[in-house]
Amino acid sequence: MQEKLEEVLLLQMDYTSLNTPAMARRGALIRREIAEELREWLPGLETVAGIGPLAVEGRDATGPKSLIPWTRVYSSQRSPSATVGWYVVYLFSAHGDRVCLSLNQGTTTWNGGAYVPRAVPGLLRRVDWARGLLSLPEADTEGWTKTIQLDGGANKLGLGYQTGNVMAREYALDAIPADDVLEADLRRAVAWLGSVYRAMDSALNVPGEAGPEVADAELAVDISAGNRRRRTGNGFRLTTEEKNAIELRAVSVATDQLIRDGYTVRDVGATRAYDLHARRGDENLVVEVKGTTSPGEIIILTRNEVTLHLERYPNNALAVVHSIKLDRNARPPVASDGVLVYEHPWAVDEERLTPISYRYETGLGD
């Protein structure tokens, strides 16, 4: 392992975006040889992580050869791609002077045509969240660093990796340790990764992640479609009782506000494609209510809800009650607080809608 890391760094000094013999050799090391060595360590790594099976992959190109290649250790359930979730990764500096073993995260998103960097403030909030989980005494982090330098200049991927780093160990080209030290360091990093994964599995809200209602809706779609690849964690994040408590709290907050505004309000959520019917004089509103424990950046809408509000505009409204507090220890669960954001009339912006599934007629019944 030591020799292979050194060879990649030496090849970095001959970097080009073209598939030259040097870059072809670099690719073989990143994607195959280093990955194979790491797979031999997986049984021990899985033991210290304590979160189920781990996988290894290396990448050195998406089109042109990447300036900063990498090989990562990850859970395929929790991080199905390098743009999603958390992982431990070897990042090779642009100038070949160092390789960083980093507890890191997805720092880009794919927009259908290119990888777009995630916003720095959001990445930093996630870094702070992850570091808070580790509760690291100084003795446990000796030799580790919270900042890394990949010498990528203005390279967006390199800057993203540097921002997204939680904890890292840097190895200079002339000081890469023996394999037993490399494996021990990797175990330490993977143990931290396990802590992050366990928190992800149980936390209601994680900075930069979809709220639990959104995650559960997407998981339900995946299960319905028989798609296991995108599933993360150990299952649904909210129980039926918890969902009901959040929904009831949101409806209560929205109803109270509408009453203060002079409306007569009826809860019609059990029988209609909207939640509240609000009447004030000759004004009749259909009101969609969404509750979430998250900051509310994303909500789930059904096809019927979208169709109805497109048809009923401008006699419609959207009430999002975000940052609801949920006491999961109470029986039944109790939801409280929440911040109401109210939009009336609500013009559904179809450019903000993202389909998460399609119904397809196979023709088998013809």
Image: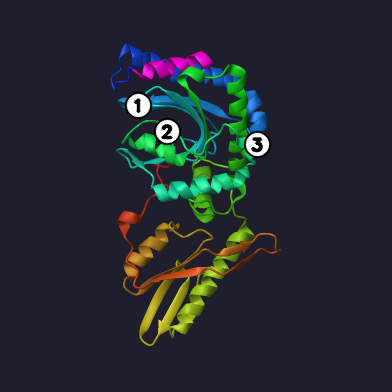
Instruction: Examine the rendered structure and indicate whether residue 179 appears above or below residue 362.
Output: above
152 relative position to 252: left or right? left
Label 3 environment density (alpha carbons within 10 Å; few <14, some 14–19, many ≥20) = few
Q: Which residues are magenta?
A: 1-13
* Mark carried by residue 36: none
| Disc number lying in front (3 or 1) | 3
Q: Which mark is residue 139?
A: 3
Q: Is residue 317 above or below residue 157?
A: below
Residue 264 location (% of width, % of height): 46, 84
Q: Along the horizontal axis of the image, is 243 left or right of 255?
A: right
Kindly identify the residue that appears in the image at 39 percent across and 44 percent down.
Answer: 361
Residue 309 point in image, percent of width and height: 36, 66
How many neighbours does mark 1 have within 10 angstroms: few (below 14), some (14-19), or many (20 or more)?
A: some
Q: Earlier in the sequence, mark 2 or mark 3?
A: 3
Quarter of the rendering occupied by the C terminus: top left
Q: Which mark is residue 149?
A: 2
Q: Is residue 253 left or right of residue 335?
A: left
Question: Which residue matches tag 1?
Answer: 66
The amino acid at mark 3 is Ala
Which element type, helix, strand or loop, lies under badge 1? Answer: strand
Residue at 66 percent of width and 63 percent of height: 333
Instruction: Tell me which amino acid carries mark 1.
Output: Ser
Amino acid at pointer 2: Gln
Residue 215 x, y percent position in the rendering: 51, 50
Q: Toward the viewer: 359 or 249?
A: 249
The span from disc 3 to disc 1 (Cα, nearest Å) is 36 Å
Q: Secondary structure at mark 3?
A: helix
- Relative depth, front residue between 61 and 251: 61
The spot of residue 267 in percent (x, y) is 51, 75
Q: Is 9 within the magenta?
A: yes
